């Protein structure tokens, strides 16, 4: 292997692999480093994704699609179920282990070099300039130098912090999440189920995402300012005891989800952040697969442009920040304010909203109609949302 590349991508998730692919296609020599033994492992994700957004990057393939989704169910704190059928766009529950492999394979086929079990423990610097990374690989310490680094190393990203970027997040915006993959559960194969309320997942929601015959991902996220008296694990245990006492737990994963707007600065001289490392997560849903890939595409493309121009300065790379803000960043700022407004709803508010929605005929239960109906019955929430849109 070479010891110097045009670009080093730290992290082999969807954002990292997409960045590596687009940079390699743009003519850059690329090294992608993944700290774990296998690309896509461990899976710390609900694995649900919209079909339309995903199709911009990869042709759907049944080998990494566990379930095809065309409906969802909302369950209120009082237990009232509201079904939304016939979603026009639809979506998938992925098998991330296979899906992430596929993305990495695409990056490799584009010309990127990939190393797994490569743990980045520090940066190579000359003064304040970032010149590469230091890694531990098979019990040896190795250095790789590069002109640019893309940090796609997840919510716990250290690379950006080492480079001097502010990557901290407020406690209230960091959801504590836990998910189990379980067998022996009855769930509809083409429907996503969401449970709401302070007794289930205060400040967040609980999900049941089908992945096959009697097989599902079940997890929840609890807002950071709601998990002092009771852990996310305890909320999930209580739910499982009540709803799926006979379930067989196959895997358990935990982690944090940054439900905030994107970091104000996601680039500096010789470095860009992408994916969860840049907080490119939908603040309302907590989803970050497609948005991470979109950020990865922008970062990889700009990196290749910088290599061709011979300019790796923040002044040149700042275009990446502007592109992201135009594509999704500004929208996520609005969504963050909407999330804050919706977070003020009490269990009684949620129950009343479910009653209103359930009174609509099935043909009128579109997402837009559901949200509009809920807002019209909650003038204060409507005011908060209007103010959120007007202020951005």
Image (cartoon, grey):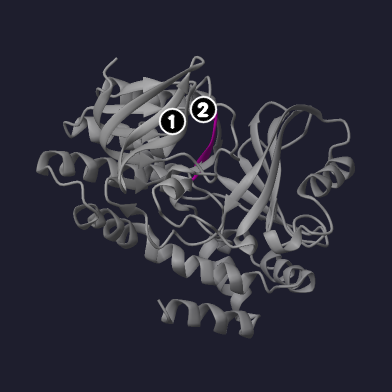
Q: Tell me the residue at 59%/63% (across/down).
A: 170
> Badges 1 and 2: C-beta atoms under 8 Å apart?
yes
Determine the secondary structure under disc 2.
loop
Please report the bounds of the magenta region as a residue range: 89-96
Q: Is residue 160 above or below residue 344?
A: above
Residue 341 x, y percent position in the rendering: 60, 74
Residue 346 x, y percent position in the rendering: 75, 72
Q: Tell me the residue at 50%/42% (across/down).
A: 154
Name the side, left or right, on which 144 lies relative to 63: left
Residue at the farthest front position: 127
Which residue is the site of mark 2? 40
Q: Is residue 260 above or below residue 347?
A: above
Is residue 92 one of those drawn in magenta? yes
Which residue is the site of mark 1? 12
Q: Residues within 10 Å of mark 2 (few under 14, many from 20)?
A: many
Nearer the N terminus, badge 1 or badge 2? 1
Q: Is residue 105 above or below residue 194?
A: above
Name the side, left or right, on which 63 lies relative to 133: right
| Numbered disc total | 2
């Amino acid at each position: 292997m070479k010891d110097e590349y045009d670009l080093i991508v730290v992290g082999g998730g969807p954002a990292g692999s997409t960045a590596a692919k687009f940079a390699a296609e743009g003519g850059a020599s690329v090294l992608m480093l993944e700290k774990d033994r296998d690309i896509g492992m461990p899976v710390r994700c609900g694995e649900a994704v919209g079909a339309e957004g995903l199709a911009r990057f990869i042709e759907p393939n049944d080998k990494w699609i566990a379930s095809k989704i065309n409906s969802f169910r909302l369950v209120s704190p009082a237990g009232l179920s509201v079904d939304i059928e016939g979603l026009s766009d639809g979506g998938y529950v992925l098998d991330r282990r296979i899906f992430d492999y596929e993305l990495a394979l695409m990056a490799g086929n584009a010309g990127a070099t990939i190393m797994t079990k490569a743990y980045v423990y520090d940066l190579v610097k000359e003064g304040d300039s970032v010149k590469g990374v230091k890694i531990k690989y098979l019990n040896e310490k190795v250095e790789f130098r590069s002109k640019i680094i893309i940090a796609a190393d997840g919510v716990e990203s250290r690379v950006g912090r080492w480079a001097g970027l502010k990557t901290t997040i407020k406690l209230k915006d960091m959801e504590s999440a836990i998910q189990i993959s379980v067998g022996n559960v009855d769930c509809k194969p083409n429907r996503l189920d969401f449970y709401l309320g302070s007794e289930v997942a205060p400040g967040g929601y609980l999900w049941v995402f089908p992945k096959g015959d009697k097989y599902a991902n079940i997890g929840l996220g609890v807002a950071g300012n709601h998990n002092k008296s009771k852990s996310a694990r305890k909320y999930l245990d209580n739910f499982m005891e009540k709803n799926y006492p006979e379930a067989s737990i196959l895997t358990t994963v935990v982690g944090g989800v940054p439900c905030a707007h994107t970091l104000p600065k996601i680039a500096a001289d010789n470095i860009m952040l992408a994916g969860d490392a840049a907080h490119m997560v939908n603040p309302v849903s907590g989803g970050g697969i497609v948005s991470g890939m979109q950020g990865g595409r922008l970062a990889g493309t700009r990196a290749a442009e910088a290599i061709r121009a011979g300019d790796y300065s923040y002044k040149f790379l700042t275009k990446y920040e502007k592109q992201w803000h135009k594509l999704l960043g500004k929208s996520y700022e609005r969504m963050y304010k909407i999330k804050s407004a919706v977070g003020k709803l009490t269990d009684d508010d949620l129950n009343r909203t479910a009653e209103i929605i359930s009174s609509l005929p099935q043909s009128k239960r579109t997402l837009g109609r559901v949200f509009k109906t809920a807002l019209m019955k909650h003038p204060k929430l409507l005011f908060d949302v209007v103010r959120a849109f007007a202020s951005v």
